[in-house]
Amino acid sequence: MEDQLLASIAYVLPAAVTGYITYYMFKSYLFQQNSDKKLQLLSEKKKDSLPIKLQAYERMLLFCERMHPSKMVMRIQPISQISSDYVSLLILTIEQEFEHNLVQQLYISDEAWNGVLKAKNIVENKLQQVAKNADSSSHFQELILKEFSNNSSPTEIVIAILKNEVAKLIS
């Protein structure tokens, strides 16, 4: 009986060891294949989303350039000589362009989006502050040009953030 038991163990033990090794190797192989496929899918997803992200950054950079106060007063002519009417037109223009680009927040970082929001609010507040000291639209334009020739605009800071993030995306 003992001989039969030892003979059975002699046959079963190598088969069990071989089966375990085969199972372990097959499991490792499948895990590696899954990892490779996940990496490949992630790479393809990144490759497909990169142009969309770059376009979003481009649009936000353009928005920041267009709402730069000194560039706005050169581009948009007053509708009347009353400075408050002109400021309302400028703020309305900023708001319309902002609403047009609102969806871009899906594709840019939170830091960049918050920077754009802060810059927009600061520019609008600054326009309103300067308008209080202006006698007319042309005087308002002069004050804005003087203000932002000496000081940097908050839009310039956001543009630097956007460019930095694009450089990270590309590299």
Image (cartoon, helix red, strand yellow):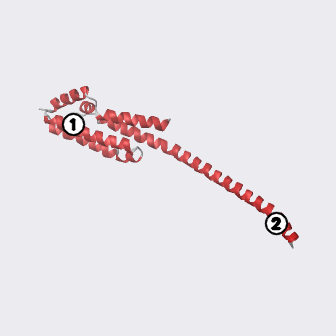
**Left or right: where 146 falls relative to 30:** left
Percent coordinates x, y for residue 52 in the rendering: 45, 43
Residue placed farthest to the front in the image?
2
Is residue 133 something one can see in this rendering? yes
Left or right: 126 in relation to 53: left
Judged left or right of residue 34, residue 94 is left
- Image position of 169 (left or right of 25): left
- Viewer-nearest of labels 2 and 1? 2
The residue where tag 2 is placed is: 9
Q: Is residue 110 above or below residue 5?
A: above
Which residue, given by chain and number where applicable, does mark 1 sit on?
126
Image quarter of residue 69? top left
Q: Is residue 14 placed above or below 142 in the rendered structure?
A: below
Kind of residue at badge 1: Lys
Give the Cα separation between the discs numbered 2 and 1: 89 Å
Mark 2 surroundings: few (<14), some (14-19) or many (≥20) residues within 10 A:
few
Q: Foreground: 52 or 133?
A: 133
Q: How many other residues sit within 10 Å of disc 1, few (<14), some (14-19) or many (≥20)? A: some
Residue drawn 62% across the image and 53% down it: 34
**Comes first in the chain, label 2 or label 1:** 2
